[in-house]
Amino acid sequence: MSKNPEFVKFDKVDKSYDGKVLVVKDLQLDIAEGEFITMLGPSGSGKTTCLMMLAGFETPTHGEILLDGNIISNIPPHKRGIGMVFQNYALFPHMTVYENLAFPLRVRKVEKDEIDKKVDKALSMVSLSGFETRMPAQLSGGQQQRVAVARALVFDPAVVLMDEPLGALDKNLRESMQYEIKHIHESIGVTVVYVTHDQSEALTMSNRIAVFNDGKVQQLSNPAELYEKPVNSFVAEFIGENNTFNGEVVDIAKDKCKVKLANSEILANPISVKSKGEKTTVSLRPERALINPTDKMDNMFTGKIEEVIYHGDHTRVRLNLLGSSEFILKVPNSTSNLELKVSQDINIGWNSVDARALDPK
Amino acid sequence: MSSETKQILTTDGIPLEVSLKKAEKKNKIKAFLLVAPLLLFLVITYIFPIGDMFMRSVDDRMVTNMLPKTFKAMEKWENLDELPPEEVYRGFYEDYKLLAENQQHGKLGQRLNKEKNGFNTITKKLFRQIKRKKIDESASLKEQINKLHKRWRDVEYWQAIKRTAPPYTASKYLKGMDMYFAADGSIAQVDEDRRIHRILWLRTLEIAFFVTLFCFFMGYPIAHLLATLPMKYSNLLMICVLLPFWTSLLVRTASWMILLQQQGIVNDFFVMIGLVADDNRPEMMYNKVGTYVAMTQILLPFMVLPLYSVMKTISPSLMRAGKSLGGTPFVAFWKVYFPLTIPGIGAGCLLVFILAIGYYITPALVGGASGTLISNQIAFHMKTTLDWSFASAMGLMLLTGVLVIYWIYNKLVGVDNIKLG
């Protein structure tokens, strides 16, 4: 069975609520069949609006949404056959777990035996067998969440939408649920569109991530690429931690450029700068800068330790480096650890490949 | 594990339970003192009047106190189909003489006349004889009294006196249901053409039921709109719903009279659009129609507010979930939204029904003859006939009716399923 790479397609979609501001601008997005795609972005970035348009609760102001090649903009939500997990689960409080799961099957006039079978299967998939007669209020948050997932999947929808489903859970439960949802996705191969503002959630679960900001997709790529190779400073800032230097390009070659900071110069990897004189923000991941590097690195500087924060598995060191006192270093916790003391001077080095010269902030 | 539970002691050796009670006692007393004024207020304004009403409705001690010797002697009256023995006549004579001396004999005559027609004449006759001292107390009183009037020789009159003996009576309640105690003490029905109370009870129930129904069908969409509109519009709408509350009930009813009368605005409008002919304007007031229209409008807020407060708590994502799972908008409404509003429906309907069943001013003003309710009848007996005990009895019957409805509701839906706000 060949997978359709354009199973869900947003084609030049615009959306405005008040006729003045576009919440979604010219969205072009293809989602492949069986893919787990995450829409990630700060609140107000338009990601939930996109999800609501796909579910049918909002209509695009302009453009079309296609599902498996068919335009669905004019199909009401209940005929789209798209499962959805809501932010606060939206379990029907007056129905038992069984009735909640049977609801989508009953409205489809499925036979009673078939309903029982499917409900059983869905509940065992989220390891909640035996909870059929419970009311949603008698379940813990994590269990309600599983029921909501099971309910969205029980009628075998082609696409499942999840709108920040783990937002209300505590940290440990959220992490275990992330794996659980990922495994369910892998085992049944349904297409999942997941919305979250939690970047670690997005990185853990997704095949691809669409980073939203200001109504636009800033970058659409797989988690590793997104983290390693952000294409602009918003993505670099939003995903993971980031040390930035603002400066101006003074010299540029094919894969290296020289950026002039306030009172020094660094070498960087030109990503979105093209010519001399451009303003740029250089982004460097904290773990790519090393203390007292043994190998030869093309950026070598000396900084002064301002603060040392112990985090268990690693230690965060805040440095005063190149005129900025916000330079963060992550030092892994190992036995060969150095003595790190405040106001001590240390040597820092990094490769220019890892210092990405992006658009100015 | 052993079944014995070890008593837990605090550090200074006092059992934990005792210590806890001691610690909470002060708070309990404080809490009670805080609610005490309200409790007192409730007892004085609610429990006492109802108790007093009940006493009034069953109280029949007047005759009992007036004829103590008669009733004492009547205990020995065995064959009730025959005239009572001499002792009863003597007791009655002595009681009546005492009443005549205290100028109380008139009241007795009137009261007995209510029990059986014709008493007033024969007691007055007896009074005149006593006044003129024509009665020889040493001779047989039975013979002398029987000679005064043929009615004294009729056993039914003596049975009537005996019926007034018990200090308490349920006769007012029977009267409220168009029944009475027949001469032989059995319960009999009032003649069919005189059964006014039953018609009123049924009409009260009918009007209360339909007003509740109309309020529900009108209030549900309003409440839904209120709960789903954006704040700035819903506030305005809420004011529109509450506006009637801020206007005097009398003014609202009067404005309905202006609207509904035959030469009123509504009729003018019907004529103008050609719905009815000018010389054939329908009567919309002084009948049930007027009562329905005005009461529905006045009681509507009591339906809207509980519904609104319940609907406000229903997350809009539930309807969305229903639709996204494949339910048509109607199925999503009927299977998801509607069941969740039942506590509000219960509260609203109960509130409107109970208010409607005892409604007074509006039916009195716009109801006319066919649109008045039982409360108007109660007011009539309070103000016009001054039969307070009958008014009390009917008031209590109304209260009992409401309690029965509440009980049925509790059985069907469950009171814990009500949500007033």
Image (tube, coloured by chain):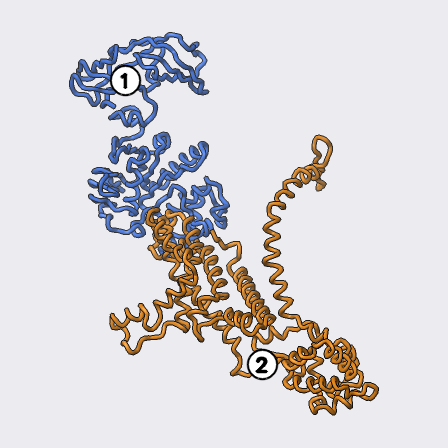
What residue is rendered at 22% in x and 47% in y? A71
Amino acid on which the number 2 mark rests in the picture: Gln
Q: Residue furthest left?
A: A275
| Total marks placed | 2
Give the chain of mark 1.
A
Name the residue nearer the viewer: B212 or B248: B248
Q: Which chain is orange?
A: B
Asked if residue A110 shows in the view, the reply is no
Q: Which mark is residue A245?
A: 1
B362 up-or-down from A296: above or below: below
Q: Which chain is blue?
A: A
Determine whether label 2 and label 1 are within 8 Å by CB: no
- Position above or below: A357 against A68: above
* Residue at image mark 2: B189
Q: Position of residue B407 (x, y in %)?
A: 55, 62
Front residue of A5/A168: it is A168
Q: Mark number for residue A199?
A: none
